[in-house]
Amino acid sequence: MLTEEAARVLVEQATLAELRLAMASGDATSRQLVLAYIARIDAIDKRGPTLNAVVEINPDAVAIADDLDRERNERGARGPPHGVPILLKDNIDTADRMETTAGSLALLGSKPARDAFVVERLRAAGAVILGKTNLSEWANFRSIRSTSGWSARGGQTRNPHVLDRNPSGSSSGSAVAVAASLATGAVGTETDGSILSPSSVCGIVGVKPTVGLVSRSGIIPIAHSQDSAGPMARTVADAAELLGAMTGVDARDAATAASDGVFHRDYGRFLDPNGLAGARIGVVRAAAFRLGPKTRPVLEAAIAAMQKAGARVTEVELPNAGRMNDTELEVLLYEFKTDLEVYLASRPGARVRTLGELIAFNRANAQREMRFFGQELVERAEKKGPLSEQAYTDALSANHELGRSHGIDAAMDAAQLDALVAITNGPAHLTDPVNGDSSAGGSTSPAAVAGYPSISVPAGDVHGLPIGLSFFGRAFSEPTLIRLAYAFERATLARKPPTYKTTVELSVEISET
């Protein structure tokens, strides 16, 4: 049995497979892992670098681990994550002693009636829900001038690679926690970029599944046409195993009916170190992504690595990549009002039930809720009508046409591709609560608007700031994307653990004149 110190060493950078082996062999217990992660959260998240990624530790985590240890000894493991500590983004319902707030003070104290479906699935597979992570408040759908990684409940989360840089949003805390080994893996949510972008800038793997592969019931929504929960981990293998534990048809989320017969319980079987051999990959260099020139060497190195691994790589144009911004926002504004008010109506004890009440609450608590930025998006959404309005149905139809048949599907059909790739986004910008977020560009929107899957994998860095490469493709193509992403990961080994620098270290060369 490991000593307490040995357990603390084990959890630093440990993979799910390594923890599973340690518990199966009797070298470690789930209880030891939980305590080691709690100690690490205290040392790194609450003190030391002070990342501020975890907003709450599950008060029952140790007791749950004890039960799972007994069950393992008596009947064996339930599934791959049995006894493994996992963190959840604070917009995912848990019917326990933890809060679920989306970062808003308006939801503090009210308790969900039941677990989100993904939480039910993870608990059934034996995962220990260790705690909740901070996020950009309301999943970053509150203001056009927001600071990602900030919420009124949790404050500002910091990027573990360079502390004055932003972790991106909205699954900020989940990405930071995984990068800093505060848990083996975490669950994030995405509408457009909220899993992929923080995964990229924090140097981890993030999977944004096809809309409908993972249930959204019990998750505080933005928009049902784009929302999805997904796993975040340090390796593709860990993300694949967690994804399998999260899938399934859920009667409370009609979109999951489309996954019947195509979802998998074991995505680990698609891991293939030679998975790039013979693959047809389309590289998208669309100017609409607004990626700066410093990401180009990362992309060129990624292309070279894929070609060396046997992939046939060709440059492609992604039609309409820059034409969806207006229609996407229109859809999100309409669906946010409808979807969030449906959620709030089912939330026992919620002090706000409508967007109007939420707006009033934020104004009444402006010193805490709006000290850095406002709520322009909520106010715009509140003015929208029902989803039967022509403006909404036209925008949604345009999204699907531009993103699917005239977008990703068209590009893949034209070159007979297995997947598309693009730099996920630029390097992390400085956290600036005065001016809000700046942007170094990103490629997440086409797949997000289409409702199609994406996986971001570490691909390199710019001045020590991680850069991810996104693999994306058709609906329910997760097996193909996992195979390709895993082979790329094995070929490049680009991920680096965080070093908690206070700022970017630049070497300046002065030439003699």
Image (spheres, rainbow, N blue to C red):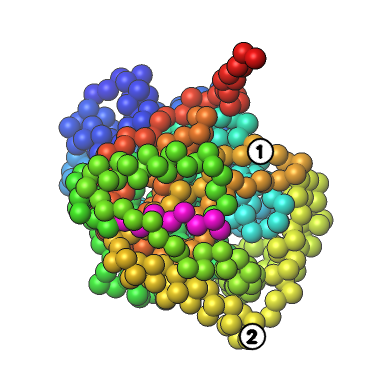
Residue sitting at the far front: 513
Q: Is residue 44 magenta?
A: no
Residue drawn at 35 percent across, 75 percent down = 257
Q: Give coordinates of residue 362: x percent, y percent.
A: 76, 56
Q: Is residue 283 magenta?
A: yes
**Residue 332 located left or right of residue 248:** right
Q: Give coordinates of residue 202: x percent, y percent.
A: 49, 38
Say few, some or many: other residues with alpha carbon within 10 Å of mark 1 (under 14 / 14 to 19 / 20 or more): many
Q: SS class of the residue under badge 2?
A: loop
**Residue 179 located left or right of residue 84:** right
Disc 2 target residue = 389
Quadrant where the N terminus is found in the figure: top left
Let me know if residue 88 appears in the view.
Answer: no
Residue drawn at 70 percent across, 56 percent down = 144
Give how far apart the Cα atoms at labels 2 and 1 are: 38 Å
Disc 1 target residue = 431
Let me know if residue 75 appears in the view.
Answer: yes
Q: Quadrant of residue 53?
A: top right
Quadrant where the C terminus is found in the figure: top right
In magenta, the rendered stretch is 281-288
